[in-house]
Amino acid sequence: MSDKYTLEKIEILGGVLEYIYIPGKKDLPTLIMLHEGLGSISTWKEFPKQVSNTIQNPILLYSRHGYGSSHFIKQRFCNSYMHDEALKVLPVLLSRLKISRAILYGHSDGASIAAIFAGSRPATTIEGVILEAPHVFVEEISLEGIKMAKLAFKNGKFRRGLKKHHHDPDRTFKNWSEVWLEPNFLNWNIQDYVRNISAPVLLIQGENDAYGSLKQLDAIESDLKVECSRIVLEGIGHSPHKEEPESVLHALKIFIKER
């Protein structure tokens, strides 16, 4: 991220969150960027700047509690950690920052959080929902991907990569991986929230996503009662915005321009 964007801090639910607000045209809804399960502000790398150069909307991105340099507020994640973020943290954050109109853009866990928030009838007016590599139920491919990530973390290289983006990579990784691999997490499902989304939706996924199959997109499309667009990128994995940013930026520009 460019130095012109200032890293700010705000206390929410007893823990400090780091965030960046990129100004844009005041009459446009703010794009809220919600990072993946092991993400943070810095894991987006240059993509927020690229988005800002593509659209005129203000942009908000933040590191959730326990990620990046944001504070931990719980000893461990519970099965409802994505619901807690969408229903407890995000509404307070947007209210405190006086954001009343938004377009949600979530990646992976962030996409699930975006779907829960949009389907919860929030006070914030949601004008669009962009879900990249979303999870709405648990698949075996997701669990196998996390098991492989756990092995890579133990081997050291993955941990070294995460250390660049998180104050306490061991605790961050442990919290995230353990909750997904708990047997009772198999029942996690957010399709009831998807059915209540009232804003247009854009779905983005890589054909070779190691953490979820296209069944996720199929389920979302079948549950939605609103306009939905779908983009599947050939030969791309779990992070289309990193692997093929031009295609994602083009899709975002068209989708957001129509709002």
Image (spheres, grey):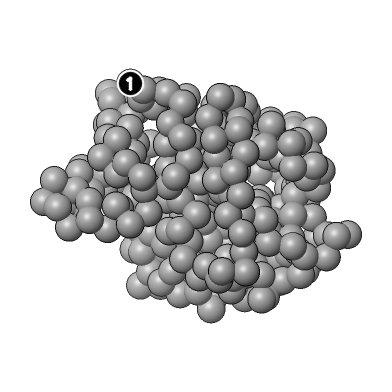
List the single residue furthest toward the bottom.
246
Quarter of the image holding residue 180?
A: top left
The residue at 53%/78% (across/down) is 246
- Tell me residue 93's x, y (percent): 67, 37
Residue that label 1 marks = 184
Residue 143 as seen in the image, left or right of residue 207: left
Looking at the picture, how far across and down is residue 198, in whole percent? Answer: 75, 42
**What amino acid type is highlighted by mark number 1?**
Asn
State how many labels appear.
1
Residue depicted at x 45% and y 58% = 42
Q: Is residue 12 above or below residue 49?
A: above
Report the quarter where the C terminus lies. bottom right
Image quarter for residue 51?
A: bottom right
Q: Residue at x 66, y 43 (%)?
A: 224
10 Å crowding of disc 1: few (<14), some (14-19), many (20+):
few
The answer to whether 239 appears left or right of 118 in the picture is left
**Element marked by disc 1:** helix
Q: Position of residue 226 (x, y in %)?
A: 73, 48
> Could you tell me residue 176's position as x and y percent?
34, 36
In the rendered image, the vertical position of residue 126 relative to residue 207, given as above or below:
above
Q: Could you tell whether 218 is left or right of 143 in the image?
A: right
Given residues 239 and 91, the one toward you in this image is: 91
- What residue do we see at 62% from left, 76% from top? 250
Q: Is residue 177 visible?
A: no
Lateral position of residue 208 relative to residue 4, left or right: left
Residue 156 in view (yes/no):
yes
